[in-house]
Image (cartoon, coloured by chain):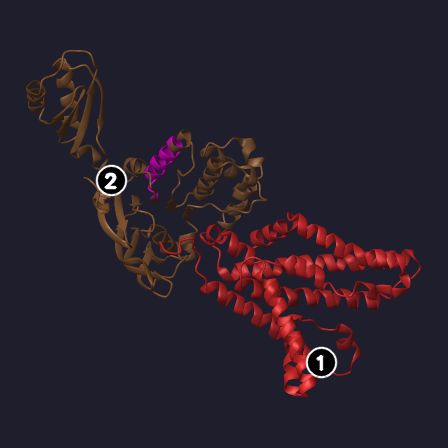
Chain colours: A brown, B red
Amino acid sequence: MSAGIVVESLSKTYRGGMVRALDHVSLTIAPGEVFGVIGPNGAGKTTLFGCLLGFLRPDSGTVTIDGQAVDDLSVRAVTGYLPERLVMDRWMRGREFLAYHHALARLPKADRARDVDAALARVGLEADAGGKPVRKYSRGMLQRLGLAQALLGHPRWLFLDEPASGVDPAGVVLFRRLLAELKGRGVTVLLNSHQLDQVERVCDRVAYVSKGRVEAIETVSAGAGAARVLRVRWAAGGTPHAREVLNAIAERAGAALESVGATEARFAVADDQAAARLLGALVAGGVPVIEASPEEGRLERLFLAGEGGPR
Amino acid sequence: MNEALILAMLRQRAASPVRLVLLAFLFGMPLLVAVGAPAIGLSVLGDGYGMILVLAAGMIGQDLSSGVLQLLFARPVTRSSYVLSRWIAVSLAGVALCTLQALFCALLLTLRSAQPEMRTLLLVIGDNVLLAFGLAAVMTLFSSLLGGFGDLAILLVVTITGKVLEAIAQFANSPIMGRIGTEIGIFVLPKIALAQVFGSADVPWFMLASYASTVTLCLAFAIVVMNRKELSYASSG
């Protein structure tokens, strides 16, 4: 049974202790979990990644992956990493870059050509893109190539630092699909991203990091069961909907009316089922609903709360 | 040592147009002279210092500056393996170029009816093999200390320091200072004159030990330096 990633009281300072990047961070990431890390710039997220990957030496505290030291070669052999700023030898072609990392990962030479082709296809890079020098790649292509190298050799531990940065919408969808697939295969994923909606969609749990500390850890996989505010818009030009009528519909559906405008209203709903009941009741009550959306994500609220902004 | 790292290093060198131009110049120039003045013989080659330096410059420092090491060390690659692979790659490339140059030179001299002695040819090749491994070890250490081409700056400063000490020693009549200057010079240019080794009745143990210790210590220090290095683009968070 794997022990997962265990971080205990991790602290890291820079500039001779003048800048405290991590302050007694403790967390445990279970095997097979997709764990997100969010927080403002300079919060310590990248430093946390650096310590988890063994690039940085913590001042104090410990990190183990599957019970091993983070720089243990047996751990690294099953670790994939996509850095925030992907830097690679610009003279290489995409296929060469992947073949190089295939060799570094000690994967069988006999499988190299097949694995490289499969990796390119997996991230949606055309076969001829593999023959282009990486210096001619767009930002999105580089990010896809970086993801392809991180996925080489079926890693058990995957560290993704802003993976969807600079990627087009199709790439974002692909990335989300890949993460779902990896999760299905039991890969443990650590994801650092500023794209809160992405994090909320793919992660099981999310840590909010600020000023080097883990301020909160939110379970988001239970998103379907979470309370939220639903913003409902209806077609303009019809009969105005009185507050009392909307309130009565909401109460019958187990929701609560929060506010009403000319063509929209805000309802507090307990969960997805309640939201569905409310929308059904509104339509049945003659309200020509044209749009319904959660007012803000849970992570957005978490983030704003952490930043001291409006909840 | 890691085959993938060695091959990648060699290909990285071959992909740099500036290096290729410099190497072509340093490789071809003595050959042209040999054609024009065959009487000079194999001594026209000098040693392969220039070519080895062109191959070695920035051998680790460039990776430190560019940020490629993060991705590399996320793989099951030890830092000592990385350091030794860089050293071997530069040494082998240096040996190959110097040997090829010596062979070409011998061929050209033969065509110009100035056939060199086989013993001289072998000594030139042997000297350059030892110089390649020695100089590459020194540059490995210097390159691990500073990013980019900082190794060249360190080499320049250390070499000048040695020369200045030797000059001061002459003025001040200080044998100790002179010896320090000489040792610094030997350190930055570790080589063994094989003609001296094979030509003398006594084995020059000091020369051999000095060479071996310089190479070993440089590589050991480079590994220590790399093991202590933190890799991050996050300076404050």
- Measuring from the top left, give residue A269's x and y in whole percent: 13, 29
What whole-number distance in Å separates the C-alpha atoms at marks 1 and 2? 73 Å
Q: Which quadrant of the figure has residue B56? A: bottom right
Report the side of A62 relative to B60 (left or right).
left
Q: Which residue is mark 2?
A: A299
**What residue is rendered at 27% in x and 56% in y?**
A25
**What residue is rendered at 21% in x and 46% in y?**
A308
Q: Secondary structure at mark 1?
A: loop
Q: Main secondary structure of the magenta part?
A: helix
Disc sitting over residue A62 in the figure: none
- Measuring from the top left, give residue A139's x and y in whole percent: 48, 38
Q: Look at the image and give the residue range highlighted in magenta.
A: A173-189
Disc sitting over residue B204 in the figure: 1
Camera-side residue: B170 or B6? B170
What's the residue type where badge 2 is placed? Leu
Q: Secondary structure at mark 2?
A: helix
The answer to if A188 sits in the magenta stretch is yes
Report the side of A288 relative to A156 (left or right).
left
